[in-house]
């Protein structure tokens, strides 16, 4: 085990980092953690392995974990590759999840702000008797989000 490991952030590459950051702030209450990032040059090229790499973006504090909680890092590179369409069953990172008071209300808010539906709102009971209502939606750029609400 790595000594003193602590989860810090998840990175999301955007086509429009400002628009996507605004979405996560408006819908989920994510708060910008200054400064905005604007990187280019030999160090970024060496670290990313991308000749000529340039990126801009920001970190957003995820809700529910206080001032030292993890962030969602939203970056936009000057040159983007075409992405495969997100799918809930594609290997690799799948989605970001938010616990919400009402899945239906949160789903409506995501849709009103440019997101899209993936499946239906469903409920299930876990093996230990907990009940969760959940659904998948996408943000305006097509990244998958799970909305979930737990009850006993």
Image (spheres, rainbow, N blue to C red):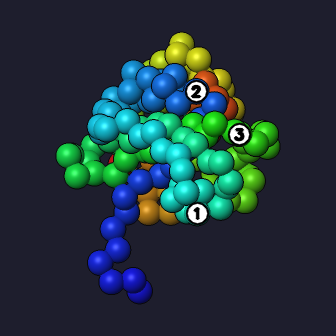
- Horizontal side of residue 64 vs 127, given as left or right: left
Above or below residue 10? Residue 58 is: above
- Mark nearest the camera among 3 and 1 is 1
Mark linked to residue 76: none
Quickly name the residue at label 2.
16
Question: Residue, x 39% and y 21% (percent of image)?
Answer: 26
Above or below residue 87? Residue 15 is: above
- Mark nearest the camera among 1 and 2 is 1
Q: CA distance from mark 3 to mark 1?
A: 18 Å
Circles 1 and 2: CB distance less than 8 Å?
A: no
Residue 93 position, x and y percent, is 62, 55
- Disc 2 is placed on an element classified as loop
Residue 147 position, x and y percent, is 50, 37
Question: Residue, x 31% and y 38% (percent of image)?
Answer: 35
Residue found at the very far left of the displayed protein: 67
Residue 85 sits in quarter: top right
- Disc 1 is placed on an element classified as helix
Quickly name the residue at label 3.
80
Quickly name the residue at label 1.
46
């Amino acid at each position: 085990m790595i000594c003193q490991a602590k989860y810090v952030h998840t990175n999301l590459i955007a086509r429009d980092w400002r628009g996507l950051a605004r979405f996560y702030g408006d819908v989920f209450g994510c708060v910008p953690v200054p400064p905005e990032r604007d990187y280019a040059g030999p160090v970024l090229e060496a670290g990313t392995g991308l000749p000529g790499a340039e990126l801009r973006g920001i970190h957003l504090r995820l809700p529910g974990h206080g001032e030292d909680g993890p962030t969602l890092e939203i970056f936009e590179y000057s040159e983007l590759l075409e992405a495969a369409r997100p799918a809930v069953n594609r290997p690799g990172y799948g989605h970001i999840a938010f616990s919400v008071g009402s899945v239906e209300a949160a789903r409506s808010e995501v849709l009103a702000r440019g997101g899209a539906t993936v499946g239906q709102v469903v409920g299930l009971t876990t093996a230990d008797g907990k009940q969760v209502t959940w659904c998948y939606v996408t943000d305006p750029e097509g990244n998958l989000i799970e909305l979930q609400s737990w009850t006993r």
